[in-house]
Amino acid sequence: MSVAIVTGAGRGIGRAIALRLLADGYRVLGCGRSARGDDFPAGADWVQASVADTAGAQQILAAAEALGRVSLLVNNAGVQVEKTTADSSDADWDLVIGANCRGVFNMCRAVLPGMEKTGGAIVNIGSISATAADPSMALYNASKAFVHGLTRSIAVDHGPKVRCNAIAPGWILTEMADDAFALANDPEAAKRDALARHPVGRMGAPEDIANMVSWLASDQAAYVSGASFTVDGGMTAASPLNPGSF
Amino acid sequence: MKLQGKTALVTGGRGGIGRAICARFLAEGARVYAADLSEGGSLDLPGGEADFIRLDVSREDEVRAAMDRVLDEAGKLDILVNAAGIEIEKTIKDTTLEEWNRSFAVNVTGTFLTSKYALPLMRKAATNGTTASLINFGSYDGFIADPGLAAYCATKGAVHALTRAMACDHGPEGIRVNAICPGYIDTPMLQSFFTGEGSGGGGKDIGALQQAVRDVHPMRSYGTPDDIANLVNWLASDEARYASGQLWVLDGGLSAQVQQMKL
């Protein structure tokens, strides 16, 4: 049975990805900075480690290889700090760049030697914020641009055995999004406004991203590499100005 | 005086943006032909007076005649600006075939025809290492959609692709081809959009709507025709001799951001 590594698998999008890959028949290894949560799926394994450290990435790889051949890596772990460039501290840089850039790099570098021998796929979770900015999210926006750039490099350098793609999620209802709404002056009005900006009439669910991960990992996507797919309910197809929603 | 000795033709030359471009070109020393369907409005502009050519850009005979006149009078054409354009404020459900065809006739076929018949004149300008400059008008709506502007968005996407194609084909002849992609510019077309039913603005407080639009822009304002003329002037000048095949978005940062939720 082939093994899938899902980073940041404890909650939100990562947890949905882990559940989906279990259903797809993978042996799933989830990882995160926290201990295994009570609600983490019973069929999946867990290792507590930080992707931001080289040693942590090696620890995750070793745990995965103990389960079998690693054929899929999903780099989902990510953090956000809601600050402008001027307000960001060295600690903010280390946190955001450490997890979102170095973490993705560490994990890809760890799995590539094995994948180059036996084949495999990498799916990185980027963001729509990689190509257009969310205000006061400077390091996060920049870190996600890195993810899409590294995705293309890996596809170019490590094909044909390895396919590497990225997903740019829009607004997915996770704890991270709930936090953002909770900070709004009028959280209910904020949610109504957000809904009006989505052509599909709803915000995303973690499962919407898991569906795309499943497809990108599958043989259906055998000719897909180096690509970034946006899954955002049509939000970025529309102008930021939508008089209808004023 | 960046355009001394150059001859320019600006379609839509009496429109909001076209007129500002004509004025700027005159101030920079160019000989300017303002081509427009409309006969109204003075072309006696600060910096000089533009020559008027009445022109429906979608009619091949009229375009050919216009270029023949420029050739007779000026002997060459250094700069062509395809600023003529129309905007139908409807979804495709409500757009008639006639409206769809008219949108493409002016915005796409017009750009094709004026470019096609200007090329021989532009080759005459592009000699001894000097380049000629062809500037199309795309739109930020060619990248991301405003509601109720379906045919307009489609025509602008077509202009973007045509711009790159012409840049590839005619670069070796010394002709540079670029497109300007304006965001919200204060023109009669924008006012019509604000008051239009199809765009969702109909019946609302226009002042409040305009302020809301400004507030969504990182620069907190929408643009003026002069903002566009500034970039057109640069692209038309010899300073831009290595600039070709690009889509120049000028929108006060509007499209640099993702949708701004009201948090």
Image (tube, coloured by chain):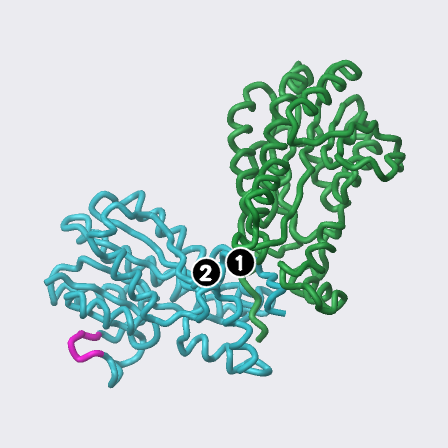
Chain colours: A cyan, B green
A216 on left or right of B4 = left
A78 on left or right of B75 = left
Would you call the spot at circle 1 few (<14 residues within 10 Å), some (14-19), or many (20 or more)? many
Q: Which mark is residue A234?
A: 2
A70 on left or right of B8 = left
User: Residue at coordinates 76% horizontally, 41% vertically from top-left?
Assistant: B15
Q: Chain of mark 2?
A: A
Given residues A18 and A144, the one toward you in this image is A18
Task: Please say whether residue B249 is one of the residues in the magenta stretch.
Answer: no
Let me know if marks 1 and 2 both belong to one chain.
yes
Would you call the spot at circle 2 few (<14 residues within 10 Å), some (14-19), or many (20 or more)? some
Residues in magenta? A41-46
Question: What secondary structure characterizes most of the magenta part?
Answer: loop
Q: Quadrant of residue B128?
A: top right
Q: Chain of mark 1?
A: A
Q: Position of residue B245 (x, y in %)?
A: 55, 33
Secondary structure beneath disc 2? loop
Instruction: From the image, tell me which residue sits under label 1.
Output: A238
Three-letter code for the amino acid on which mark 2 is drawn: Gly
Three-letter code for the amino acid on which mark 1 is drawn: Ala
Q: CA distance from mark 1 to mark 2?
A: 7 Å
